[in-house]
Amino acid sequence: MAKKTADDEPLAPLTLAVGQEELLLDRAVQQVVAAARAADADTDVRDLTPDQLQPGTLAELTSPSLFAERKVVVVRNAQDLSADTIKDVKAYLGSPAEEITLVLLHAGGVKGKGLLDAARKAGAREVACPKMTKPADRLAFTRSEFRALGRSATPEACQALVDAIGSDLRELASAVTQLAADVEGTIDEAVVGRYYTGRAEASSFTVADRAVEGRTAEALEALRWSLATGVAPVLITSALAQGVRAIGKLSGARGGRPADLARELGMPPWKIDRVRQQMRGWTPDGVAVALRAVAEADAGVKGGGDDPEYALEKAVVAIARAARSRGRG
């Protein structure tokens, strides 16, 4: 989610939105425009790209108006401005015009850093819009979206939604809005499943999760649903392989905090917690059996067998049995 400075006044003379997450950058702009139009419905908004902001253009846009109209000037990809235009912007920062809010969208990083530093030195209101590459960040974003809408969603529901939607923040935000509008009461994992279980990634990983948890009937049901909705068998074998390998990695790791294990194993901390719950019935022999079953299924769905669906069913059953091997031993 976008992080703002303590002095969070959208109508400050200068707002600096820094990062590469397009949804958050757009929201930073929308917040300023909404505040400006709440103060003056006739606010003039100019949304410009670097090629539209030539030397001298900013001076024209910010020159005193006969009618003293409120104006919002948005400059996107400010790091790509020409050297002469950057000089214009820096000069403006030293003496901003009244009734005008300048919004600079900057990707961060080295390119255009001089402008970034100048804006900060000028006391810009800053909104951080970092790219959310980590599942834990997207999970926190999803929770915050539900909270912003005044709705309650279980942790499992939020995780299921992130698993189903993936890395597209716009889709995540849209999904939260849809669920909040359609569903009464607390939103749980079952609700998310009804809405999004048809997605390829979500349904293939559901098969894997149920299998490594030893829930044979549910794993087979999820498998049949996935195949019926057109999920490619190779995606399912990939998910099964990832699930079993995660069990093997964690079972062979030293004990420690999720954050430490995450660094050691290359998994996000939230996944460490999930795999810890899934691995309770597993033994090293069970992991070996399951890996062989996945390898056989992989060969079966890639042309080594006559019936890919049967190969997957056989693998799911073998994995689910392996998940209960400790109890049988």
Image (cartoon, helix red, strand yellow):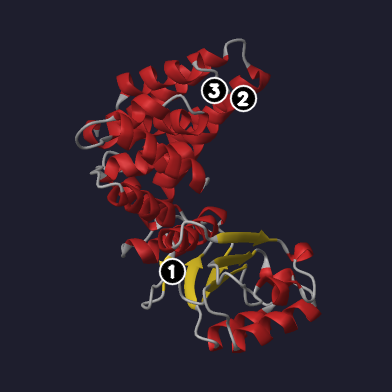
How crowded is the residue under tag 3: few (<14 C-alpha within 10 Å), some, or many (20+)?
some
Identify the residue under disc 2.
299
Sequence-first disc among 3 and 1: 1
**Does label 2 or label 3 sit earlier along the sequence?**
3
Distance from the alpha carbon under mark 2 to that under mark 1: 58 Å
- Tell which residue pokes out farthest to the top in this image: 306
Residue shown at 27%/30% (left/top)? 183
The residue at the point 57 percent across, 55 percent down is 22
Residue bearing the label numbered 3: 231
Residue type of the residue flagged with mark 1? Pro
Name the mark on residue 47.
none
Residue closest to the far left: 185
Between residue 88 and residue 310, name the one nearer to us.
88
Residue 166 makes an appearance in the image: no
Label 1: which secondary element: loop
Horizontally, is 169 left or right of 94 in the view?
left
Q: In this view, does 73 lie above or below 23?
A: below
Which quadrant holds residue 191?
top left
Disc 2 to disc 3: CB gap under 8 Å:
no
| Pick the front one: 292 or 320 | 320
| Alpha carbon distance from label 2 to label 3 | 17 Å
Can you say whether 120 is above or below 71 in the image? below
- The label shown at residue 10 is 1
Give the position of the N terminus as an image quadrant: bottom left
Q: In this view, does 279 lie above or below 91?
A: above
Quadrant in the picture for residue 225: top left
| Foreground pick, 288 / 216 | 216
The residue type indicated by label 3 comes to Val
